[in-house]
Amino acid sequence: FCFSNTVETEHTGRTIRYKFRGFGCPANQLMFARGRVDEESANVDIPEQISVADYFEQQYKRKLAYPHLPCIDATNGVSKRANWLPMELVKLVEWQRSLKPLDATQRARVSSKSIIKPLERYNQIMNIMQGRDFETDIHLKDLNIRVHKNEMLQLKARILTPPDIRYRHRQDKGEVIEHVDVGKWRISNRFYATPEINNCG
């Protein structure tokens, strides 16, 4: 999902389109206040807490197959009110292009979901290795392949010194040296003219 895409639902019997805004808690955990009629107090609405999953089952007779998936926060029209929609009932409108780049907050949210810490990645790989029965795999035996799954292979490594970037100063006044810092270096005011190429090859 991109944060400017349009999604649509059909749970009401007609197609309704929304602007995607973000994700929320799972449908069986996300609670909101729904007004109900109290028969003993002259039709006064009394708010009650209900989960998104229970609301869709009661209101639209749609029992969610995946209530543990996060809800989608979408807006409809000019209203800023959140519309929490179960993910399984939402479709992404086809043939959309997102030309607007993600801002810093959106990039941080994407990175927090996609980047896995080294220890967590290690545990995931080791769990997969321990769950596989490589010793009885007939295909590995036919190819004479043995898998050592007790521990990862450890290799010696070294940290390389970052390189220096050298520019030739204009008017032949020597070289300008820029130090690389975390893969970045300054190039401002280092290019004054482009060389003329008369032939190639």
Image: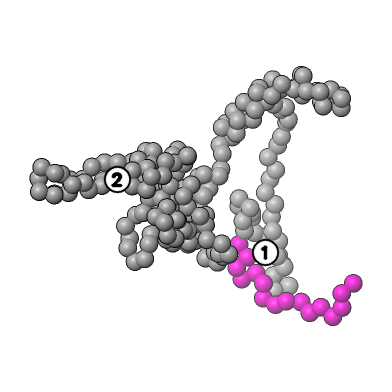
Rendered image: mark on residue 10? none
Residue drawn 56% across the image and 37% down it: 117
Q: Residue furthest left?
A: 41
* Callout in the foreground (2, 1): 2
Residue drawn 14% across the image and 44% down it: 39
Q: Sort mark 2 into few (<14), some (14-19) or many (20+) by Cα contacts within 10 Å.
A: some
What's the magenta region? 186-201
The secondary structure making up most of the magenta span is loop
Classify residue 80 as left or right of residue 150. left
Above or below, 183 relative to 154: below
Q: Position of residue 167 (x, y in %)?
A: 70, 65
The residue under label 2 is which amino acid type?
Answer: Phe
Above or below, 170 relative to 24: below
Which residue is label 2 attached to?
32
The tag earlier along the polypeptide, 2 or 1, is 2
Rendered image: mark on residue 176? 1
Q: Position of residue 3 (x, y in %)?
A: 47, 58
**In the depicted view, which residue is nearer to us: 72 or 183?**
72
The residue under label 1 is which amino acid type?
Answer: Val
Q: Position of residue 106 (x, y in %)?
A: 48, 54
**Does the image show residue 20?**
no
Asked whether 65 falls inside the magenta stretch, the response is no
Asked whether 199 falls inside the magenta stretch, the response is yes
Above or below, 96 relative to 180: below
Q: Secondary structure at mark 2?
A: strand
- Label 2 to label 1: alpha-carbon separation: 62 Å
Residue drawn 37% across the image and 38% down it: 29
Classify residue 42 as left or right of residue 146. left
